[in-house]
Image (cartoon, rainbow, N blue to C red):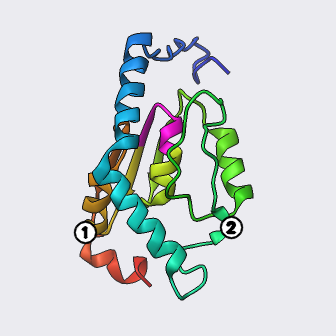
Amino acid sequence: ENENEEGEERPKRKRQKTSRKARSRMRRKMKKWQKDPIVMRWKQDRRDKILGDSVPDKYGPLQGYPCADTCPSGKLYLENTVCPMMFKEEAELLFKALKPESVVWEWGTGASSLYFSQCVKKWTSIEHVTAWCLEMRSVAPPNTEVRCVPIEPQYRECMLS
């Protein structure tokens, strides 16, 4: 398993370790983000919109509320004003996979991006709706990169149907 096709041994990839200083710096940035008044106002408005909509489950299953307030490690506080729009069992499954050193790449940005990204080292989210992308980018945690990647014109019809 550690050999290439010619039977030569492959060099083992070294896992990049995050220094204690860098982790501490990121925790401070995350705590600041969790209390940011602009982010909190956006999240409260979004939560009110989700929970107050006349169409049940328009944004996903409301059974996700309330959601956990700590990461699975139990060491990190989770700001949970806005919860992922998924069933609790789905959230539990994701929590089992996410570790503090996880690096995540996802398609589609939303409440789950803001929520779960608080438990990992790095989160990258690709969003195709430019206005939503810019909005999410403005409220994303410090370890989260939201990339705006519009769908090319020749693929719009099949992607948006």
Q: What crowding class fits label 2: few (fewer than 14 Cα within 10 Å), some (14-19), or many (20 or more)? A: some
Q: What segment carries the magenta color?
A: 117-123
| Residue 116 x/y as whole percent | 53, 46
The image quarter containing residue 57 is bottom right
Looking at the picture, tell me which residue is in the foreground, 144 or 78: 78
| Residue 98 x/y as whole percent | 61, 38
Q: Which mark is residue 63?
A: 2
Furthest-right residue in view?
89
Q: Amino acid at mark 1?
A: Ala
Tell me if I can see residue 96 in this picture: yes
Q: Amino acid at mark 2?
A: Gln
Classify residue 105 as left or right of residue 1: left
Q: Secondary structure at mark 1?
A: helix
Q: Which residue is mark 1?
A: 131
| Residue 78 x/y as whole percent | 54, 41
Q: Residue at x 70, y 40 (%)?
A: 96
Q: Residue at x 51, y 55 (%)?
A: 112
Looking at the picture, tell me which residue is in the foreground, 3 or 60: 60
Classify residue 133 as left or right of residue 7: left
Where the N terminus falls, by quadrant? top right
Classify residue 51 as left or right of residue 24: right
Labels 1, 2: front one: 2
| Residue 86 x/y as whole percent | 63, 63
